[in-house]
Amino acid sequence: MAAIMAARGQGLVQDFDFFVVVDFEATCMKDVRIFPQEIIEFPAVLVDGATGRIESVFRRYVRPKHHPVLTQFCRELTGIRQEDVDGGVELGEGLWMHDSWLKAATAGAWSLAVVTWGDWDCRIMLESECRFKGIEKPSYFDRWINLRVTLQEAVRAAGLDWEGRLHCGLDDARNTARLLVELMRRGVKMTITGSLAPPPPIQQKEQQPQLLTSPCGGSSAPSLIQQKQQQPPQPHMISPCDGTSATCFCYCRVPTRGGVVSVPGPMQGKCFFGCGNWTPAMGPVCPYFVWTN
Ligand code: AMP
Ligand code: MG
Ligand code: MG
C-alpha cells in the first residue's frame, strides 16, 4: 500500500494537525432508494494528528424534512429513535454547530482532514443534500481521507474488532477513529483520498459553459467542474423538462447526464437523460429520467 511508510511501530509526523472522523446516518428504506435521502445523525470524533489521542466527540441528531417519520427499517438499522430526530436540528444548524465545536476543540489552529469510511458521506450524502437544500457547507468537507482506501486489509491485520452497534453513527465514527489512531501508531501517513471539484473561478456573464457532445447529438451534462461553474437553477427550471436542453437539471439540482442504452434489447441505442449525480458505484442519487428520442 503506497500510503504506508516504512516506519513501522512508531507514529509518523502527519500532514494534518487534526483529523475529524465523521459517519453520517440517513433516512432509508429496505430495498428501496429513498428520495431525497436526508442526514439524521451527524457525529464526529476529533483525533490529534500528533498524539493520536481522541480529543473530543460531537453528535447532533438531524430532523429530516421530506420523510420526517423514520421507517421501522431505518430505526432498527441505525438505532435512532423517532424522538431523537423529532428533537433534532436542521442540517444547516448541525453544520454550524459542528463547525463551532471544531473551532473550539482545535483552538482555531487547524490544518485538518475529514476522515470517513467510504466515499459516500462526503461525495454523495452531504454534498447532494446541501445542493438540494441550498445549504453552504464548510470547505473542509470537500476533501477527505477514505480510510477504506487507506487500509483495506489492515482492519484484520490490526486485530481490531468493531465495537458498539453497527450503523450507529457515533459507534461507527468511534471505530473508524480507533482504526485511524492504530494506523497512525503503525506509521501510516494519512493523505487525502478524494475531493470534489475545485471551487469555481469567477465566471464572466457572457461565458457559456462548454458542453460535451453526447452520442445522440444533443447536449449532455457538463463535466463536474463545469457543473460547479453554473449558477444553481431556479426552482421552475428543474423540471418538468425533456432533458434535451443544456439548462435541464435533475431533482438534485445538478445538470442532467446524457447516456445511450447499450444493453441489447428493444431500447438499445435509445438516448436518455438522467440524474447528474450518477456514479458507477452508487448509480443515480435521484429518480430523474427522460427518454430523448
Ligand atoms: P453506515 O455508515 O454504513 O452505517 O450507513 C450510512 C447510511 O447508509 C445509513 O444511515 C442508511 O441510510 C444507509 N444504509 C446503510 N446500510 C443500509 C441498508 N442495508 N439498506 C438501506 N440503507 C442502508
Ligand atoms: Mg458510514
Ligand atoms: Mg454508520
Image (cartoon, rainbow, N blue to C red):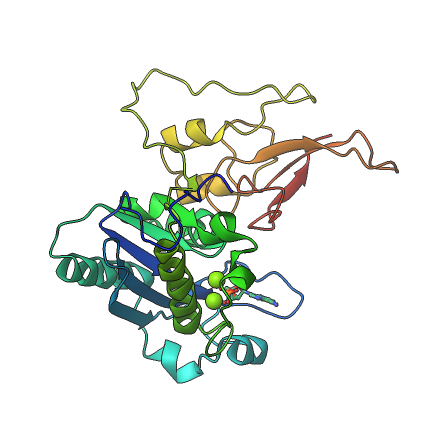
Left or right of 239 in this view: 89: left
* Residue 186 image point, x, y percent: 39, 55
Residue closer to the observer: 235 or 125: 125
Residue closer to the observer: 250 or 87: 87
Q: Quadrant of residue 84?
A: bottom left
Residue drawn at x 42%, y 73% is 171
Residue closer to the observer: 54 or 45: 54
Left or right of 250 in this view: 198: left
Left or right of 3 in this view: 14: left
> Farthest residue in the right direction?
265
> Farthest residue in the left direction?
107
* Residue 226 image point, x, y percent: 43, 26
| Residue 60 appears in the rendering | yes
* Residue 104 image point, x, y percent: 13, 61
Residue drawn at x 35%, y 54% is 184
* Residue 190 image point, x, y percent: 37, 46
Which part of the image, by quadrant, shows the C terminus?
Answer: top right
Residue drawn at x 47%, y 32% is 224
Q: Is residue 255 above or below residue 119?
A: above
Q: Quadrant of residue 220?
A: top right
| Residue 230 appears in the rendering | no
Q: Is residue 276 above or below residue 46?
A: above
Q: Quadrant of residue 245?
A: top right
Total marks placed: 0
Left or right of 120 in this view: 244: right
